[in-house]
Amino acid sequence: MGQLNAGIVPVTPFQQNCTILFDQDDKTGVVVDPGGDVGRILETLEGNGIRVTAIWLTHGHIDHAGGAMDLKDALGVEIVGPHEADKFLLDNIEGQAARFGVGDGVRNCTPDRFLKDGDSVAFGEHVFEVLHCPGHAPGHVVFYNRAAQFAHVGDVLFHGSVGRTDLPGGDHPALIRSIKEKLLPLGDEVGFICGHGPGGRFGDERRSNPFLV
């Protein structure tokens, strides 16, 4: 098994961190949260010789799932996740586009498989535990690789901030519970990539994030 690597392709006017997780040796991997700009994602995959086995979604907001169906059509792979509680968001991505005035070409999304807390997903020998972390969106999930001490947290937690909860289905107390009960106990050394901006480590957020201190 090669080293777990990650590359980020910023997509959409929201500058969302579409993430390519891949094995350094055999170049198999997955795309997490293809919110749009599918052509750019495909160019990145082709330019780096990465063979994608699935698309993983953390939640159902337009900037994370808006390009998933087009990418599925281009690659012929399954869409996995998020939790079924986000179905109402995935069914209305085109409505989200109209509300925000963005998203030419985005499509409502029908995952091949929803996830629940305690599930696991994998590519090659890289196994990720699925943590259901509602608050930013009711069906938000986090992907945690215990071997690499790494998590993709979507829009649950940011460097110095937390996910917004003023969108449909948002719940600030639930979000803080998700972070404090599901993420921080994984350990201070866990590194994370988030949905927007730079990532970090859980320990730094536990000590200095103003929403958690």
Image (cartoon, grey):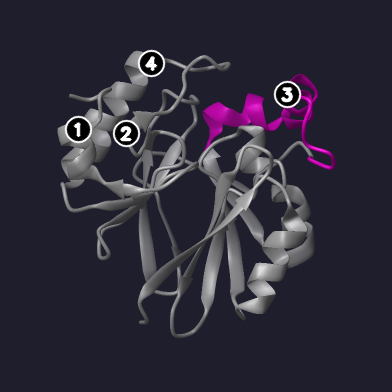
Q: State yes or no: residue 110 in magenta.
A: no
Q: Which mark is residue 160?
A: 2
Tell me which amino acid carries mark 1: Ser
Name the residue beneath numbered marker 4.
172
Q: Is residue 187 left or right of residue 70?
A: left
Location of residue 2 with respect to 58 vertically, above or below: below
Between 110 and 195, the residue placed more toward the observer is 195
Location of residue 67 with respect to 180 vertically, above or below: below
Q: Residue at x 19, y 32 (%)?
A: 208
Q: Which mark is residue 109?
A: none
Determine the image quadrant of residue 109.
Answer: top right
Say what secondary structure mark 1 lies in.
helix
Magenta stretch, residue numbers: 83-106
Residue at mark 2 to residue at mark 4: CA–CA distance: 16 Å
Between 63 and 110, the residue placed more toward the observer is 63
2 and 1 marks in contact (CB < 8 Å)? yes
Say few, some or many: other residues with alpha carbon within 10 Å of mark 1 (under 14 / 14 to 19 / 20 or more).
few
Determine the image quadrant of residue 116.
Answer: top left
Name the residue beneath numbered marker 1.
208
Say few, some or many: other residues with alpha carbon within 10 Å of mark 2 (under 14 / 14 to 19 / 20 or more).
some
Say what secondary structure mark 3 lies in.
helix
Name the residue beneath numbered marker 3.
100
